[in-house]
Image: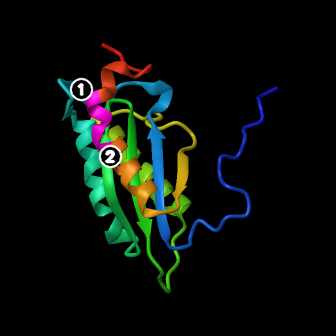
Amino acid sequence: MLPVRKNPRLKGYDYSLAGCYFVTIVAQDRFCLFGHITDGIIDLAPEGIYIQKWLDKIPDHYPNAHVLTSVIMPNHLHVIIQIEESERKSALSQVVAYFKYQTTRDICIFRGMKFRVWQRNYYDHIIRDEEEHRRISEYIKQNPTNWEEDSEFVN
């Protein structure tokens, strides 16, 4: 019998509400597919370049969703997505699902084979105020310099 997965979303919260959301998406099996970090600088692999391409295109498909801060790490992505008030509501889950679909499609075409690029779900945190936004943005920006201390670091 398969284990029952816990829903990581905040129960009863409307993720289409205007606000900022800190999102972490992890590569399947934490495989380092997106690039390499040397001396705190990320050198994106072609797979990482596809990720950047689709991060940049999020507002083209969801005009009320904007990427404020992001970093592509070797085996995960951190991003702050801002959802604005709009007639056409876009829930955070729609934005993330669209992004994961597009990046998976491009990476599988590039590699010439189908495989799971991303883990099944993602982590999110609702950013509640400016101080929290500043702290999380700084964490994202500093993430590459802290890579070697990360428990997921693979040399």
User: What's the residue at 21%, 33% (across, down)?
Assistant: 42
Going by the numbered disc 1, the residue's amino acid type is His
Q: Locate residue 91, reporting x and y percent.
A: 55, 67
Residue 96, placed above or below residue 20: above
Residue 111, placed above or below residue 85: above
- The residue where tag 2 is placed is 138
Instruction: Tell me the tag on residue 36.
Output: 1
Please name whichever residue, 136 or 16, is drawn nearer the observer in this view of the structure.
Answer: 136
Quadrant assignment for the C terminus: top left
Residue 104 occupies quadrant? top left
Crowding near the residue tagged with mark 1, few <14, some 14–19, many ≥20 C-alpha atoms within 10 Å = many
Q: Locate residue 53, reporting x and y percent.
A: 25, 53
Q: Most prominent secondary structure in the magenta stretch?
A: helix
**SS type, badge 2:** helix
Residue 81, placed above or below residue 60: above
User: What's the residue at 45%, 54% (across, down)?
Assistant: 132
Q: CA distance from mark 2 to mark 1?
A: 21 Å
Closer to the N terminus: mark 2 or mark 1?
1
Please report the bounds of the magenta region as a residue range: 140-145
Q: Residue furthest top?
A: 155
Crowding near the residue tagged with mark 2, few <14, some 14–19, many ≥20 C-alpha atoms within 10 Å = few
For the question of whether residue 102 can be seen, the reply is no
Residue 37, placed above or below residue 110: above
- Label tally: 2
Residue 139 occupies quadrant? top left
Q: Is residue 142 magenta?
A: yes
Q: Locate residue 39, reporting x and y percent.
A: 17, 24
Please name whichever residue, 113 or 145, is drawn nearer the observer in this view of the structure.
Answer: 145
Q: Residue furthest bottom?
A: 87
**SS type, badge 1:** strand
